[in-house]
Amino acid sequence: MEPWLIWVLAGLVLLGAELVLPGAFLLWAGLAAVGTGLVWLVAAPGFPLSVVIFVVLMAAGVAVGLRRRRAQRPAWLNTPESGLAGREGVVVSASATGLRVRIGDSDWAAQAEAGGLRAGDTVRVVGVEGTVLRVRAAA
């Protein structure tokens, strides 16, 4: 079997494994192997140089993937005080134990600045204390 075909088939197997075991690591290894096979098809660099080409292509793919992932991450991720203040939500439940407010697709424990809130009322977040939202009725 031709060496370029072995690289391409190994790359396709790794890409198939990425579908079964998603995690984005096998994606870069598979793409690097396919790329190495295509380079081998054109230039036949020999085994030691093909391993270097594979490592370089894989490192470049991982670097691009990490840069892309960092660019897509919202700046307010996992910082409730910067992402939730000023947002509006709906009171899901109001009981003696406290309020639960839904903002987006998440429910949060809340504390009202002024009483009288019932389930279904619209509220605005005015602050965050730990994981508890300070809310007031939306005007």
Image (cartoon, rainbow, N blue to C red):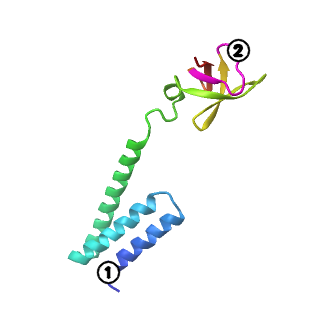
Judge whether residue 43 can be spotted in this image.
Answer: yes
Residue at left 48%, top 64%? 18
Q: Of helix, strand and loop, which one carries label 2?
A: loop
> Where is mark 2, residue-wise?
115
What is the magenta range? 113-125
User: Which of 31 and 110 lies nearest the eye of the viewer?
Assistant: 110
Q: Residue furthest left?
A: 43
> Where is mark 1, residue-wise?
3
Quarter assignment of residue 114: top right
Left or right of 128: which side holds 97?
A: right
Q: Quadrant of the C terminus?
A: top right
Q: Main secondary structure of the magenta part?
A: loop
Up-down relation of residue 3 to residue 125 (above or below): below
User: Which of 16 and 101 lies nearest the eye of the viewer?
Assistant: 101
Residue at left 41%, top 72%? 12
Does the magenta-highlighted stretch encompass residue 51?
no
Up-down relation of residue 70 to residue 117 (above or below): below
Q: Position of residue 89 (x, y in %)?
A: 60, 28
- The type of residue carrying mark 2 is Gly
Q: Quadrant of the N terminus?
A: bottom left
